[in-house]
Amino acid sequence: MRSKPQAAAKTATKKRRRWLRWTLGTLGVLAAAYFFFQYAVVDPKLKPLIEQKLAEAVHSPVVIQSVRAGLTGDVVLNKVSLVVPGQPWESHIQVDQVSVSVELINLLFQRKPLENCLDSLSFVRPQIVLVKNQASPPSLGVPAAQAPPSVAVPIPLFPVPKVSVRNGSFSVQGEKTPRSIFTGLNFDASTSNRTTWGLSLSAHSPETGSQGVVRFEGGFQPENLKVRGVVQLQQWPLGSLGSTLKETTGWDLSDGTISAESPVVFQQGRELWYDAKADVSQATLKTPGPVFITFSNISGRAILRPKEINIANAISYQVGQTPWKATGFVPLDGRPLSVKASTNQLYLSTVLNDILKLNQVKSEGTGSASLVVSGPLEAPIVAATAKLGPSKLNQWPVDSFEIKGRFENQILYFESAWGKLMGGSFTADGLTSVLDQPGAPVSLRVNLVDVQA
């Protein structure tokens, strides 16, 4: 006969086993119910509904791989892709995961319309590509460099009071290959009355090793598609902007960084407005052919506006070995340039080798120079004066040298030149074309007085 403690222990063991079987069975039923709910109710019922409503919001088809619903009312859309049409640009968006905070029961049984069931929308790792619509007509009769920078970008409007983006990327595709603009893109937008939205954005430069950051704080009015706020750039690499500048003006911008702060106003179909105080550091700028002059180590502050660059305080730069300082006004809408530059350390090799490309001429000597740039940006007119001390041209000693000239329509005019050479003096004038073409004009007249060869 068993003792009472043994019987009690056996009874307790049986109770524990029954409780464990009941718990496992309950969990199994709940798991089965959950998966049935996900695959038989949520995915087939919500997926087409959400695809339809999102397609209506962006006026284009939306594809969702799968839809899952949480017990707290969150709905997760996996692998979402959509195209927001526009002219001349359209937005291609692919998102790893979209999380929607929603009134699930009201949405499932359609007690409320979709826009009244949504609380927030979160995009995780979206890849956004702004693609130029190949069907858009070209600007007839207006060169690219002179066309007004009117911007028409498709903006998706989702029926939800809160939208966020985490760890996204943004690219622009004008030709065949997309060009990365932003990585690490984070964005928040919220509204309480659906007439005005608060916006906050931050992103990083895609350049390897770059510390460039862009930030934006502002607002958005859906009624007139108007964005207003303040943008900040910190150590943004200028190389990422160089291809756009080269396509529009022919000037090639590379190296260096820019830091800037500016109010910004953007409205669909209108010109982008900004008024930026920009600090440039160690930039490199190359002129279009056929001259191909390289301006390096460009540093200083400029005021940037849509139709002009204003250099009130001197910007420093180098051409070859020669350091320069410049001030002035550079319009981007066809108005004439007004720029002045000067140096007290002009290297003769800079003029002959880096500007005139006379690499066969070996030279030594320093002096000073000043120049004034006028005319249109596409065909500037440069008037210059220079003074040199003791110098050498291919081992010919020059005691002193002064020259006045101008550059216009690809022709370099030597209006007057005089100096002291080998115990005598000389004067000269003439012209030469910088175009390496047969029949290019060349004319040079030199008068020597008491020169002892």
Image: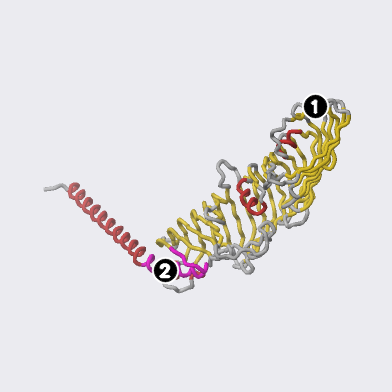
Of residues 83 and 252, the one nearer the viewer is 252
Residue 48 highlighted magenta (yes or no): yes
Is-magenta flag for residue 49?
yes
Amino acid type assigned to the residue bearing label 2 in the image: Pro
Residue at the spot 32% in from the left edge and 59% down from the top edge: 31
Q: Is residue 341 left or right of residue 6?
A: right
Which callout, 2 or 1, points at the residue further toward the start of the chain?
Answer: 2
In the image, which disc is placed on residue 12? none
Residue 265: which quarter of the image? bottom right
Q: Quadrant of the C terminus?
A: top right
Mark 2, residue position: 48
Q: Percent from the top left, x then y, of residue 95? A: 47, 57
- The mark found on residue 397 in the picture is 1
- In the foreground, 434 or 217: 434
Q: Is residue 340 visible?
A: no
Q: Amino acid at mark 1?
A: Pro
Q: Residues within 10 Å of mark 1 (few under 14, many from 20)?
A: some
Task: Kindly give the residue lying farthest to the left in the view shown.
Answer: 1
Residue sitting farthest toward the front: 439
Q: Secondary structure at mark 2?
A: helix
Question: Nearest the camera: 206 or 68?
Answer: 206
Residues under labels 2 and 1: Cα distance?
86 Å
Query: In the rendered image of this protein, does residue 181 appear above or below residue 320?
Result: below
Residue at x 58% of width, y 47% of height: 205
Q: Main secondary structure of the magenta part?
A: helix
Image coordinates for residue 286, horizontal then vertical, percent:
67, 44
x and y, in percent, of residue 47 in the image: 41, 66
Q: Which residues, given as a range, are shown in magenta?
A: 41-63
- Residue at 71% across, 41% down: 299
Answer left or right for 9 relative to 209.
Answer: left
Whether residue 270 sits left or right of residue 1 in the image: it is: right
